Image (cartoon, rainbow, N blue to C red):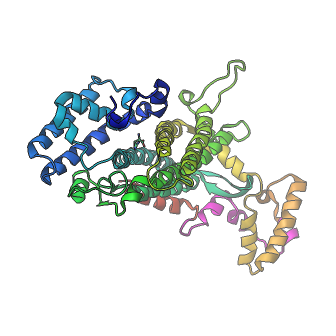
Amino acid sequence: MKLWGGRFGKATDALVDDFNSSIRFDARMYKQDILGSVAHAKMLGKCGVISEEDAKLIQKTLLEILADIEDGKVEFKIDAEDIHMNIETILIDRIGDVGKRLHTGRSRNDQVALDIRMYLRDEIDEMSALLKETMSTVVALADEHSGTIMPGYTHLQKAQPVTFGHHMMAYFEMMKRDLSRLSDCRSRINVMPLGAGALAGTTYPLDREFVAEELGFDSVTHNSMDSVSDRDFIIELISCLSILMMHLSRFCEELILWSSNEFSFVEMDDSYSTGSSIMPQKKNPDVAELIRGKTGRVYGSLFTILTVMKSLPLAYNKDMQEDKEAVFDAIDTIKLCLPVFTNMIRTMTVRKDNMLSGAKGGFTNATDVADYLVKKGVPFRESHAVVGKMVAMAIEKGKALDEFTMDEFKSCSALIEEDIYDAISMQTCVDGRDLIGGTATARVQKEVLEAKEYLK
Ligand code: ARG
């Protein structure tokens, strides 16, 4: 008979057992479920709701069940529905009537809310550690390439020279925000819901703060109905993960472009590329493409949970069981992508020469020519127009601006002198942007130092 079977005259149809059951996917919360029950039993004993003796036996047996699960000795059953009732059933099988006292003052509604919060807290810690490794690798690349000049783009058109290190540190900034979003989200997850019961609280004199303390929560929830029906924190977590994936997808997109024959700025290591079954010459950046593609999966999970929660009346509804596969899949995807991404960028080759020659094309120093004239007293709007004409002339002559002869420069502006060549070299263009947030090598090096400090 089911743990809740008292009022039923018939067994559940096998189809319904299967349909209703969540053990296939919520089994992964076994540890949180058991530790939550251990704390609940301990509190029941301490508050005199059950005897200390019973509380001790329950706790001891739960921990034995945990060890058995970890040793692969336990088989969960579909007709016990979910992880909560599977473990309770095993407990009762082992210690009979004493085990039946565990669920006093508790409902699966507050129990599942507790378990998922504990579970997500642990996963956030793991994902944050993985993200930090990615960030260290990004910083190491920035460190190595603080002086590597490449073209910077806007509209995917060459704009101004930057350093590859600066470009890498742009991603570091994004990831730093991702990490801080995860930690913010964790603080809202780390609130203890047990004691809400099914929805209205419970008549037993439970010590909720004791349970919170036992389980490492920062505080307890303040409304029992909200406690069992809140899934904001799941929406928030998948939002954070979606933004993180969006950042990875942009990074991957650039790596894919840069690996193309047209750019040839980077080359993926053979161990992080794949070939074609028909074209012998191919070397494809599949890893980067897959990460870009998996971004869609994580966004999908976000929409799943947003839609599941939309318009749900208070308090608990079974719809909410659908939260788990979405959030688990989003987490699994992140944990799959981050390490492979980290190793992919760690092992890729950076083609400095191609980056530099890329920076030299496309008149990326045109702004610096205009700035040169500004320093000679020409108003910026006017120098912009003069340089615009110079660019047209350069296109016509098929040369770069710094390949102009002195006569050609003079024909554009009498103010231009010999020092123009130095003023508009790629190196000067980069090193001149020496202010907080600028691409100058010295600035990038400072940011790299701060980043290393942050990651410690
Ligand atoms: N497996 C359920 C879930 O994930 C647990 C809560 C069930 N509560 C209930 N009253 N049926 O939401």
Q: Is residue 369 left or right of residue 6?
A: right
Image position of 21 with respect to 318: above or below: above
* Residue 313 in the image: above or below residue 61: below
Res 2 → quadrant = top left
Q: Can residue 188 be seen in this view?
A: no
Question: Nearest the camera: 379 or 410?
Answer: 379
Which quadrant: the N terminus? top left
Residue 267 is situated, as x and y percent measured from the top left of the image, at 61, 35
Q: Determine the image quadrant of residue 419.
A: bottom right
Residue located at (76% from left, 74% from top): 373
Q: Is residue 373 magenta?
A: no
Whether 372 is drawn above or below 355: the answer is below
- Counting from the top left corner in percent of width and height, residue 139 is at 47, 50
Judging depth in this view, the residue of 12 and 363 nearest the camera is 12
Q: Give the range drawn in magenta.
A: 409-437
Note whether 159 is above or below 106 in the view shown.
below
| Residue 378 appears left or right of 445 | right
Q: Nearer the viewer, residue 52 or 291?
A: 52
Q: Is 333 left or right of 112, judged from the image as shown?
A: right
For this orientation, the residue located farthest to the left is: 53
Residue 386 appears in view: yes
Instruction: State the quadrant of the C terminus.
Output: bottom left
Q: On the rendering, which quadrant does ligand 1 occupy?
A: top left
In the picture as drawn, the residue positioned furthest to the front comes out as 9
Q: Where is residue 420 in the image (x, y as percent from the top left)?
A: 73, 67
What is the quadrant of residue 154 in the picture?
bottom right
Q: Foreground residue, 414 or 196?
A: 196
Q: Identify the residue shown where x is 36% and y is 51%.
A: 198
Residue 226 percent across, percent down from the top left: 41, 59
Task: Tell whether 263 sits left or right of 49.
Answer: right
